[in-house]
Image: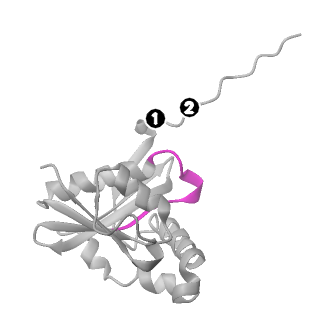
Amino acid sequence: MHLETAPPQPAAPDAALTVLELPMNDARVRPLLDELAVEYDSRYGDLFGRGSAAAKLSKYPAAEFRAPAGALLIIQENGESGAGGAFRRYDAQTAEFKRIWTHSAHRRRGLARRVLAELEHLAAARGYRSVYLTTGPRQPEAKHLYLNTGYTPRFDLAADPETIGPLAFTKELQG
């Protein structure tokens, strides 16, 4: 007797993904920020001290990430927060992207690229002409994401990231 197995299921189509603009204190944002704090502590705890990530994440007032100058977006799938990111005013023409993060249960599916695209679109719609962002020297995944999505590094790519500190990137937005 021959049993057939069902073919593998593809990743959920974009229709199953919902992009939400939320305030920083919304409960749907919390799972992403909580895991981000744990990740920062595991990567940078020896530099900044364990438990310092929560303080770094609250460095900027939540009001800076509200419209019209800012935004916080999350992507949900079936009611579960999978990825998100935010921006705030850097200067009159430039948005600063912050806290771009994909929950560990949702990685390797292109959600970070989707977050970037959504943030870029919204920043352009709100009048920004460019983006500035930084990532940490111990986040090679983020560095490669930004390089692969058209961001210009503002540091020497050949240098040891640990000697640079925050890795800065910029990008001109399409209006």
Q: Residue furthest right?
A: 1
| Of the pair 31 and 37, the residue shown nearer to us | 37
Q: Nearer the viewer, residue 174 or 81?
A: 174
CB of mark 2 within 8 Å of CB of mark 1? yes
Please name the amino acid that badge 2 sits on: Pro
Which segment did they paint magenta? 98-110
Quarter of image, res 46: bottom right
Crowd rating for badge 2 (residues with CA inside 10 Å; few <14, some 14–19, many 20+): few
Q: Nearer the viewer, residue 169 or 52?
A: 169
Q: Residue at left 10%, top 71%?
A: 92
Amino acid type, residue under disc 1 in the picture = Pro
Instruction: Residue lying at the far bottom in this picture: please name it.
Output: 49
Q: Decide if residue 128 is on the left or right side of residue 145.
A: left
- Pointer 2 residue: 10
Q: Residue at x 60, y 30 (%)?
A: 9
- The image shows residue 41, relative to residue 72, as above or below, that is below
* Numbered label attached to residue 45: none
Residue 97: x %, y % from top left: 30, 66
Q: Residue at x 34, y 68 (%)?
A: 156
In the figure, residue 94 lies in which quadrant? bottom left
Which residue is tagged 1?
A: 13
Q: CA distance from mark 2 to mark 1?
A: 8 Å
Label 1, residues with CA under 10 Å away: few <14, some 14-19, many ≥20: few
